[in-house]
Image: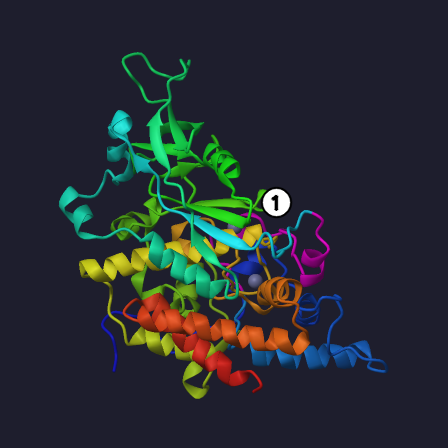
Amino acid sequence: MAGEGVCQHDELLLECSPWAEETGFERPDAVKRLAATTRTGRNPLAAKGKSAQVVKKLSQEAAEQLSASFPGPLLLPKDELNWDPDYPPQSCRSWLIEPARNKLTPERKTLYIAAPPVVTPGVSFMDAWTQPTTVPASELHEIDPPSTDDSLQYLSAFYHGLPVNMFPQSLRFVPWTEPSRHTKPGGGHGYVGLACNDVCTRIRTRETPDKKFKRQLNLNDLLDAAIEMLPNDAYSIIMLMNFDMYEDDDDDFCCGRAYGGSRVSIVSSARYHPSLDVDEGIDYDHMWPASHCKTFADSLCAIEGLEPREHIISIYETQYSPIQQAVEAARKSQIPSSAKDRSGLWFSRVARTLAHELGHCFGMDHCIYFACSMQGTSGIAEDVRQPPYLCPVCLEKVAHAIACEFQERDQTGKEEYVKERYKAIAEFCEIWKHVDLFASYSAWIQARLQQLPD
Ligand SMILES: [Zn+2]
Ligand SMILES: [Zn+2]
């Protein structure tokens, strides 16, 4: 059964696109990737008496096997690694010994999620700031924004084994009364206050440079407020925001950020609104997992004058694998057009970014080893091409933190944990299978589980 409009191309790209070479990006090779998944930093295939040559050959074979479950980072033109090809990798070992990494303890284990702050009457002018300026109001009202409860359920599955709770206090935007030189004459809105209990934090706002929203909020100020609210038993807190955000003068906008060491993070849903997708140039045919379509990657490389290459393809029809199953699931779907579909699409993007930002609170840096939920991103178009799952390196970090350090399980227990976690996420995806990302994620997990030993 074929869907309408969704990618029907037959070849998948399981390595970096040819563009990677142009940028100077050097993906860690098979030997280094395997070594990056272990706590010791040693390649598990290296044993006494094996020559480097043999280890290399075995690693390459293992990497080839793994690539249909965990393809490489695509690295298409204008992707994050395009701008920063020398970004350092964070192996499991370097994550483990990172001094700034916070560990879970029985006293400090809860992940809190805070619902978007309420706009109080004193700052009712802010209501207009959440609406994209380019979209008719009638269209906006049809599409439900991502719900905090759904987000909580997703994070509970993604960080399986940890309590995820609603932050109990309600957050409020209030007028910021201190006189300020930023306040424009005639009642400009340079600052607003973010109140939680009796603490109020000053939040800078500015006009949105690209005019997609009227104004946006400074995310550093919002994160400072989050630090103030961190409950004693919190491992971390993540704030949902329905306002557009910015970090500093150099950026147009920012969808999410974490201060990992301070265990606070924030995600804005504003830019993920599906009604902005046309402006962002989002290709609905080639969001993850169809982002790994070779024809698609070649077409983006061709814009930069690059010829397609032959040696990096896999014809997926021939093989049962997680990526192939995920693409099959995506092919059965339709381009999201109803209000319900578009709400689901919106939520799926926010969910992925929530898991990513919380990952920084676990001490995880951006991932360059594989296509991965922890990859850095240069914008919405790249965001939607990235997978929701954790690659083997990042999964090892989460499994070690939760199963070993927190639950005190051994190696076997950790392997059990990985399967339990996959099953918890699959259960979530089953409920959300009307949304493409989750349908594909579920198919990917089912195939991946079959590869893991019983
Ligand atoms: Zn990040
Ligand atoms: Zn990763």
Q: Residue at x 34, y 50 (%)?
A: 272
Q: Quadrant of residue 49?
A: bottom right
Element class at badge 1: helix
Q: Amino acid at mark 1?
A: Gly
Is residue 78 a member of the stretch shown in magenta?
yes
Residue 162 horizontal/vertical position (percent) = 52, 61
**Residue nearest the observer in this picture, 148 or 385:** 148
Residue 313 horizontal/vertical position (percent) = 49, 76
Q: Eyeballing the image, is 160 above or below 360?
A: below
Q: Residue at x 42, y 47 (%)?
A: 167
Left or right: residue 415 versus residue 161 is right
Can you name the residue that lies furthest to the left here? Answer: 138
Residue 261 horizontal/vertical position (percent) = 61, 45
Q: Quadrant of the C terminus?
A: bottom right
Kindly report the secondary structure that dominates the magenta region of the rendered protein. loop
Q: Residue at x 47, y 68 (%)?
A: 308
Q: Check the image and tell me how it is coloured.
A: rainbow
Left or right: residue 154 versus residue 359 is left
Badge 1: few (under 14), some or many (20 or more) residues near its Cα, within 10 Å?
Answer: some
Tag 1 residue: 261
Q: Residue at x 26, y 41 (%)?
A: 132
Q: Quadrant of the N terminus?
A: bottom left
Is residue 226 a member of the stretch shown in magenta?
no
> In this view of the protein, can residue 208 be seen by the observer?
no
**Residue nearest the observer in this picture, 436 or 242:** 242
Residue 225 horizontal/vertical position (percent) = 48, 34
Q: Eyeballing the image, is 169 above or below 185?
A: below
Q: Quadrant of residue 58?
A: bottom right
